[in-house]
């Protein structure tokens, strides 16, 4: 169960959002939600669940599509005037930043992202979405239009009692650095990905 801490304004290139801080007192993790407009309306809320990716979100890594997906989600919410992004602190599909760098090294040697995680002794995807329940309850959200390519997120929302009215694909262009990453997400993790280059 997360504990709500505080809300403040967050001016961005896509407009001014509200940023809400939450704390998990048991795991020592902090998570945030950024929102625009009235989230507790009866209308479905345009929403993305985004797991932290320092390399993609902040450093512009081309090995993944995370940073582009985050920016596209913020833009869509701004265009709509209403929506939310739940930003979860679970780097590298839940294995942490330093282990993600170790996984990158294995990928440099030919492993795909799933194989690299498994060689390090982790599951293919260790992410947990249960904390979203506390965040959405605080925001008053009951129905969402979920921006995702990942069926696991739809299942997680349904299990939390959140109605997913529609899935909104969030496609980005592939590049020579992330084409294997994207094909692995589709082939081994079941992500619903269509390359915008084709």
Image (tube, rainbow, N blue to C red):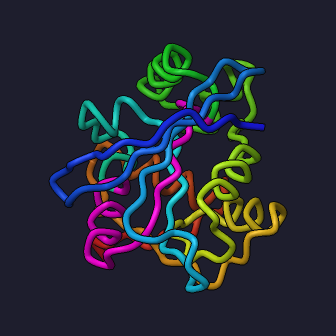
| Residue segment shown in magenta | 69-93
Q: How many marks?
A: 0
User: Residue at the location (32% across, 55% down)?
Assistant: 17
Residue 45, image x, y percentages: 53, 75
Instruction: Name above or below for residue 163 compared with residue 148.
Output: below
Instruction: Name above or below for residue 136 compared with residue 38.
Output: above
Residue in the foreground of this view, choosing between 84 and 59: 84
User: Residue at the location (46% across, 54% down)?
Assistant: 182
Instruction: Name above or below for residue 67 compared with residue 168.
Output: above
Residue in the foreground of this view, choosing between 159 and 184: 159
User: Residue at the location (21% across, 48% down)?
Assistant: 11
Check if residue 166 falls in the magenta segment: no
* Quarter where residue 189 is shown: bottom right
Residue in the foreground of this view, choosing between 170 and 22: 22
Residue in the foreground of this view, choosing between 108 and 138: 138
Instruction: Name above or below for residue 80 compared with residue 157.
Output: below
* Quarter where residue 96 is shown: top right
Residue 24, image x, y percentages: 69, 28
Among all residues in the image, which is located at the extreme left? 13
Q: Is residue 148 left or right of residue 175?
A: right
Q: Is residue 14 left or right of residue 191?
A: left
User: Residue at the location (45% across, 24% down)?
Assistant: 104
Residue 23, image x, y percentages: 62, 29
Q: Quadrant of the N terminus?
A: top right
Q: Is residue 61 left or right of residue 191?
A: left
Check if residue 75 falls in the magenta segment: yes
Characterize the magenta stretch by its predominant secondary structure: helix
Q: Quadrant of the C terminus?
A: bottom left
């Amino acid at each position: 169960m997360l504990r709500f801490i505080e809300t403040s304004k967050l001016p961005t290139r896509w407009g001014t959002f509200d940023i809400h801080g939450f704390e998990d007192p048991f795991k020592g993790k902090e998570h945030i939600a950024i929102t625009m407009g009235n989230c507790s309306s009866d209308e479905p809320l345009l929403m993305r669940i985004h797991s932290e990716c320092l390399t993609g979100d902040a450093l512009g890594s081309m090995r993944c599509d995370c940073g582009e997906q985050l920016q596209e989600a913020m833009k869509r919410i701004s265009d709509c005037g209403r929506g939310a992004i739940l930003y979860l602190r679970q780097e590298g599909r839940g294995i942490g930043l330093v282990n993600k760098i170790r996984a990158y090294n294995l990928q440099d040697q030919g492993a795909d992202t799933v194989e690299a995680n498994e060689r390090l002794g982790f599951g293919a995807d260790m992410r947990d979405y249960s904390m979203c329940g506390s965040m959405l309850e605080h925001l008053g959200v009951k129905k969402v239009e979920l921006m995702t390519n990942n069926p696991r997120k739809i299942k997680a929302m349904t299990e939390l009692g959140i109605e997913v009215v529609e899935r909104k694909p969030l496609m980005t262009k592939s590049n020579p650095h992330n084409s294997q990453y994207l094909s692995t997400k589709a082939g081994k993790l079941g992500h619903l990905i269509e390359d915008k280059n084709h």
